[in-house]
């Protein structure tokens, strides 16, 4: 690109209902455009007054994803990193709250030189400014921006106005993609297009016409439905793209290319495609579809239920990291949710019976979390994995609780615990950092944990070192509590290995058991799942899957 403004912009919005896959659609569009030889970056807009996603409930909003610079953001940022195979930072994420905060800060600093600052145009202009900054920082030819929620929501009006203003500012450089759901009423009925027609009409009321419609449905869109949508929405049939339900989200880019989506987008942006290289992606999809051997992994957590429904989005990066590792070995992962409360003697009368059911799993994984609910159930699951030599991988809280389990049952430190759950424990093997105590006392919870990428040095001869094949690593964190330094020697004396440690030797990053005592028992204070990629699985997850397959 020349120094002149030549950046192109693709906006992805949702119609009819949320949860139809705007995030993976945006990621997949980025993937196929990137495969044509262009530099792509992705931006997510969340229509919340929250400054970031750090204080949002995972059972309502889904997983909180952490970027390398410590930004706590929406789970779709994880999809962008996985599909684009690159690291993003806080410039690629914004919320309504952060946009308003930026405008108010500018007003306080006399940026507007005494002008009356208004919601329109100043808020949409700040949105545009943030998107253009993300493009500049990432040296992107094309910026894909997903607007969260649906187009009919009041809180999205300022973002749609930003699209309209940017289109006016750079004619021919903005493409608008609508992801809309086509319901099927009865198995013998037809896919209904009327909700999509109303979604387009809603966009019209905001002064916008979609360039493409991604027609989400249980099945592929037939020609008749394409014709109907095109006619009623004043569009070409070629711009109505079928987006049916499929077995793996990693098939979506290949599906989009069946309708020549990348070529059509580039044509509307006035760009000539340079190449089309999706060979590695096609190999990945082939591995997924042809995998014959399987591995069964039990994920023990507490953020699954929301009312009468299960919300796997609470652990989406963990789930995808397990899949990446399995797919790379041409293995089909069978993931099952284990409710930690059903393993807790204080909550479930059948906890012993439920614990025995863990024997069906080839591997057991305990992901991150906070608070005391279900903790004893998780500790029981960890004890089961240790005693029965079932491969175990613990993440963040899963490491802290594994340390507690070892302290109680191997080091014989009776009632050992974390001060997060029991402040009066006689053996606080997990305790809060001194600087974090000040945050808790002042109720300063947002963006105040140990966040983002930190260095850890690995012990040679350990499972961790053999997995990474490195002496030092950088991994992302999101937590307040750490292994209490006062107990490190006591735990080591009983056989616990601290195989990953911070450069100043103060923070314990990885624990494991010797291979002669357990085939694979590893837990990390960080979140390795945040750096796993479909084409580049995380080494610890690969090692975990290999050990689970052997079992």
Image (cartoon, rainbow, N blue to C red):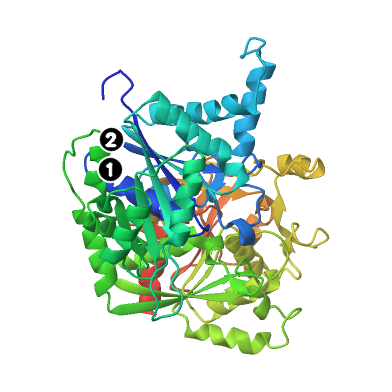
Quadrant location of the N terminus in the rendered image: top left
Check if mark 2's residue and mark 1's residue have beta carbons within 8 Å.
Answer: yes
Q: Measured along the vertical axis of the image, is residue 407 above or below residue 271?
A: below
- Residue wearing tag 2: 269
Q: Confirm whether residue 488 shows in the render.
A: yes
Left or right, 279 with reference to 83? left
* Residue 322 in the image, given as x and y percentages of width and height: 42, 65
Q: Confirm whether residue 44 shows in the render.
A: no
Q: Measured along the vertical axis of the image, is residue 287 above or below residue 122?
A: below
Q: Report the front residue among 39 and 394.
A: 39
- Residue wearing tag 1: 265
Q: Looking at the rendering, which quadrant does residue 413 occupy?
A: bottom right
* Residue 267 in the image, given as x and y percentages of width and height: 23, 39
For the residue labelled by badge 1, is the local secondary structure a helix, a strand or a loop?
helix
Q: Report the front residue among 140 and 169.
A: 169
For the residue labelled by badge 2, is the local secondary structure a helix, a strand or a loop?
loop
* Residue 298 in the image, given as x and y percentages of width and height: 50, 75
Quadrant location of the C terminus in the rendered image: bottom left
């Amino acid at each position: 690109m020349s120094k002149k403004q030549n950046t192109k912009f693709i906006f992805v919005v949702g119609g009819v209902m949320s949860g139809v896959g705007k995030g993976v659609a945006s990621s997949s569009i980025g993937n196929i455009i990137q495969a044509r030889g262009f530099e792509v970056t992705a931006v997510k807009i969340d229509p919340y007054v929250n400054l970031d996603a750090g204080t949002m409930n995972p059972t309502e909003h889904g997983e909180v994803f952490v970027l390398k610079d410590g930004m706590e953001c929406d789970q779709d940022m994880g999809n962008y990193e996985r599909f684009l195979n690159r690291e993003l930072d806080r410039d690629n994420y914004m919320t309504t709250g952060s946009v308003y905060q930026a405008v108010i800060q500018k007003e306080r600093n006399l940026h507007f030189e005494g002008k009356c600052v208004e919601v329109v145009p100043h808020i949409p202009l700040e949105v545009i400014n943030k998107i253009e900054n993300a493009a500049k920082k990432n040296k992107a030819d094309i910026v894909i921006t997903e607007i969260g929620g649906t187009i009919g929501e009041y809180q999205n009006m300022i973002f749609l106005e930003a699209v309209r203003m940017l289109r006016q500012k750079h004619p021919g450089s903005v493409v608008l993609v609508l992801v809309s759901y086509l319901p099927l009423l009865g198995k013998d009925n037809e896919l209904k297009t009327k909700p999509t027609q109303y979604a387009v009409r809603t966009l019209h009321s905001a002064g916008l016409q979609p360039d493409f419609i991604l027609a989400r449905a249980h099945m592929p869109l037939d020609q008749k439905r394409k014709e109907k949508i095109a006619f009623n929405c004043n569009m070409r049939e070629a711009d109505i793209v079928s987006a049916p339900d499929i077995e793996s989200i990693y098939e979506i880019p290949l599906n989009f290319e069946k309708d020549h989506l990348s070529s059509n987008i580039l044509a509307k942006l006035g760009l000539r495609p340079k190449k089309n290289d999706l060979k590695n992606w096609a190999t990945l999809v082939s591995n997924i579809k042809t995998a014959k051997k399987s591995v069964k992994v039990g994920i023990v957590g507490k953020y699954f239920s929301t009312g009468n429904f299960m919300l796997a989005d609470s652990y989406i990066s963990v789930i995808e990291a397990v899949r990446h590792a399995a797919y790379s070995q041409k293995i089909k992962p069978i993931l099952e949710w284990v409710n930690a409360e059903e393993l807790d003697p204080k909550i479930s009368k059948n906890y012993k019976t439920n614990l025995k059911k863990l024997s069906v799993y080839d591997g057991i994984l305990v992901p991150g979390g906070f608070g005391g609910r279900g903790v004893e159930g998780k500790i029981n699951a960890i004890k089961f994995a240790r005693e029965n030599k079932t491969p175990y991988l613990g993440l963040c809280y899963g490491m802290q609780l594994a340390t507690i389990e070892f302290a109680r049952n191997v080091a014989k430190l009776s009632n050992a615990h974390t001060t997060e759950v029991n402040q009066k424990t006689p053996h606080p093997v997990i305790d809060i950092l001194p600087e974090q105590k000040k945050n808790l006392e002042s109720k300063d919870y947002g963006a105040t944990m140990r966040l983002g990428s930190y260095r850890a040095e690995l012990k040679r001869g350990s499972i961790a070192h053999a997995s990474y094949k490195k002496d030092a690593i950088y991994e992302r964190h999101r937590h307040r509590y750490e292994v209490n330094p006062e107990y490190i020697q006591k735990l080591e004396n009983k056989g616990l290995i601290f195989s990953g440690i911070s450069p100043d030797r103060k923070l314990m990053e990885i624990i494991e058991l010797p291979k002669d005592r357990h085939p694979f028992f590893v837990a990390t204070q960080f979140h390795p799942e945040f750096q796993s990629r479909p084409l580049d699985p995380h080494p610890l997850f690969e090692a975990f899957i290999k050990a689970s397959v052997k079992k």
